[in-house]
Amino acid sequence: MDPYIERSPDGAVAIGTLDSLLNLARKNSEWYLLFATACCGIELMQTGGPRTDADRFGFVFRPTPRQADTIILAGTITYKMASRVRLLYEQMAEPRYVISMGSCANTGGPFYDSYPVVKGGDLILPVDVYVAGCPPRPEALIEALMLVQDKMAREPWLRKARGRWPDPKDPWPQPSAVLGSCAAAAKGPTPKG
Amino acid sequence: MKPEEIRDKLTASLGAAEYTPGPGDAAITVPVDRWHEAATVLRRDPDLDFDFLRSLSGVDRPAVGKIEVVCHLLSYRHRHTIVLKTGIDRSAPAVPTLSDVWPAANWHERELYDLFGVNVTSHPDLRRLLLPEDWVGHPLRKDYKEPDSYRGIPMQRPQTAAEAVTPPAAPEKP
Amino acid sequence: MQLLAERIATWLGMEGLPRQAVVAGVVLVVALVVATVVLTIAGILTWAERRVAGRTQSRVGPNRVGPLGFLQWVADGIKLITKEDVIPAAADRTLFRLAPYPVIVGIFAAFASVPFGQKLIAADLNVGVLYLMAITSLVVVGVLMAGWASNNKWALLGGVRSAAQIVSYEVPSVLAALSVVLLAGTLSLQGIIGKQGGWPWEWYLFYNPFTFVAFFLFFTSAVAEGNRTPFDLPEAESELVAGYNVEYSGMRFAGFFLGEFANVYLLSAIATALFFGGWQIPGVTPDMQAASPVWQAVGVGLFALKAGTGAFVVLWLRWTMPRLRVDQLMGLCYRYLLPLSFAMLLGNAAYVWLVPQWAAWVVQGATTTVGLAVAGVFVRRVFYHIRHVGDDVSLDLARGESGTFDPQLQVRVYGAFRRRHAGDSAS
Ligand code: SF4
């Protein structure tokens, strides 16, 4: 277990082992919301199935947003659905994470020129990880969930819970909606065939 | 029954009706004031008995200044099909409802209203079907202009990092 | 309890303290110990459930945290503590916060009189069975509170369904338990276990045909009382998002969750005590057990094994059976289980009254033979399928990718299936 090492703006170094213990527990129990808006949902279901068993990593689905940690935007989001997606996100308990799955949720995908489709889930929710593909394979989704695990493992949860984080002078680096997390998406496996 | 026979039966009870034999489904075009009557005949006449409304849709034709309303009909009993059409004025489109003839027409006509802005008169519940209630415009019209944003969500993806939007922060929980 | 308290006080050299204080202290300690044990059991069961689910669906199940993913429940627990505790704005705040406690208290308090071993019982009440049935009913209060206070239609529907279900199924389960009480002549669980023996033919399960049936009635209605599949209508996620706990997050949700799994163990523990001879060891009399700590430990282990097997069956059922419809559920209770359990109770009464001792021996022997034979056939079938079909679930059976493929065997196991598919490919 790596201890959590944080460098504050003035150069001091903090090591939190309690945090890393908590994070170890948090990242091994990442429950995702059983929610899908279009065809990517089929792959989302498949991810929990025998071939790529998401439960191995402690990823189980919860039907209600109150008990979920991660919302997976699986599929095309229409403008009518956008407010519902947003509502679901707001109902989730902190800390919460967002995965954008598939071209539709990333950018609008094949429906970019269509009038009712939101051109990317990151226009309505703060997305943590993007998964490329139409639809992404279950393995790619597992990788995305594991990237969220990485993010959890790096988070100073205790300080956040006590309200000392993010530092008002050094706010949470908000990834720019478009260009941020591209690295994360690029790290995801390319779907084959 | 052959499409021609259907046409003949319809003209017998309605008067004039324009007929287009097709390589596909043959179509009968009636003026809009006979629209409901034609539908009733097609539905009620025991020899025609079109008991299934397969689809009710619209076609926007700015060149002729009309919106065409198209009904695809099928009779399970007699195993024949026909297409019923009417053209309505594009500047003030209005058509009487068929939902008392085929209950299925209810939602089809709501869709027609939603996407073409056709005012379906005496429809029991004329609201938007697919798009949100506060949507502006009717997107299947050829002259539809996409707005810049809907409820603060931009309709185009920002092209540069400078244009990037940050999604609104979640409201503080009490 | 008080005697024990006094003995401990003497042992600690605290005779001087007021007696009530010592008693209160000891009760508190015992309660803490019981609560810890129950929490651990419930936690382990959540892990077991996910492993069983994985196995049933030819998956693996959690395997990253600890050996075989055994510490998964610890991770889940810590995760749930770190989550935000959301209280909906429109909820009844007091009730909403209070609701998990009746559930936890009802289940945990029941464990106080579960006889884990001959000496290992927190409180051997002389009305043990009655107490268990009564205290677990507290769960209804909590569930209804949760459903009502959430101010959410799914939660309310789930809560009301759950209340109806628990109250209804309480009746057949109590009646089935009464059959045993009638035979034992005591309500104390230790007394009931004492009347049985270690060997299967000395269990109340095989005492006579009536108790044999009564066990299945008890088990079915206890599973339904615990809101487990196939009776998990209060939490049916296809109808009511998550039932009465739909608005709960964090630790409060964990309360409901642990309560449910503790309930699974509780019902198997009660079934073990009533029907399976509890901590009795084959060939060892209770007196011998009382004299030797080793036998005591073996007895505790045996009880845990029997109750664990029961809990496993409940988990197994959950991942095998589809869910009932709500009207079928009530119909099952009032049209079948209730009259049957009455009949079993009357049958037992008549049996005790009419059948002479020598005939009772014969009946007991016959029931045991038949019961064990049925169980043997069942277990054999199960293992047959596990061995020959097992995890190699391939829709194309004829291809048989597993190394142990044997066409003749497949024909026997899935004969009809194969024939149908053979016809398909021929045409
Ligand atoms: S990305 Fe492809 S598979 Fe996924 S929702 Fe869009 S169209 Fe469907």
Image (cartoon, rainbow, N blue to C red):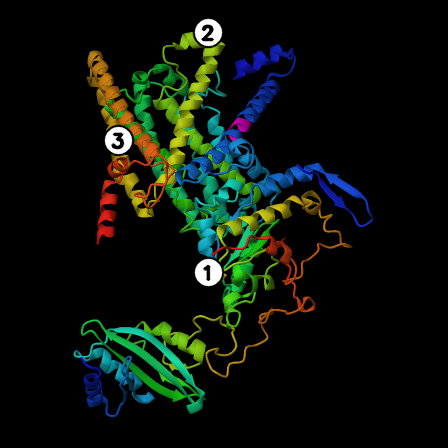
Mark nearer the viewer, 1 or 3 = 1
Q: Determine whether the beta carbon of the residue marked 1 sits less than 8 angstroms from the nearest atom of ligand 1.
A: yes
- Circle 2 sits in a helix, a strand or a loop, which is it? helix
Report if residue C65 lies within the magenta region.
no
Label placed on residue C142: none
**Dot 1: chain letter:** A
Task: Write down the residue under mark 2.
Answer: C291
Query: Which SS type dominates the magenta stretch?
Result: helix
Residue C376 in the image: above or below residue B60: above
Secondary element under disc 1, as helix, strand or loop, is loop
Q: Nearer the viewer, mark 1 or mark 2?
A: 1
> Mark 3 belongs to which amino acid?
Phe
The quadrant in which residue B64 appears is: bottom left
Q: Which residue is mark 1?
A: A38
Tell me which corner region of the image, top left, top right, bottom left or bottom right, holds residue C80: top right
Name the chain letter of the residue that bears numbered label 3.
C
Q: Position of residue C19 (x, y in %)?
A: 60, 16
C-alpha gap between disc 2 and disc 3? 40 Å
Q: Quadrant of residue A123?
A: bottom right
User: x, y (%) of residue C99?
Assistant: 52, 42
Residue at the image point whose x is 51% and y is 68% from the top: A117
Residue C357: where, in percent of width, then height?
22, 12
Label 2, residues with CA under 10 Å away: few <14, some 14-19, many ≥20: few
Part of the protein shown in magenta:
C35-39
Q: CA distance from mark 1 to mark 2?
A: 68 Å
- Please give the chain letter of the residue carrying mark 2: C
The residue tagged 3 is C342
Mark toward the start of the polypeptide (2 vs 3):
2
Q: Residues within 10 Å of mark 3 (few under 14, many from 20)?
A: some
**Which amino acid, by three-letter code, is at mark 2?**
Ala
Q: In the displayed structure, does residue C177 sit left or right of residue A95?
A: left
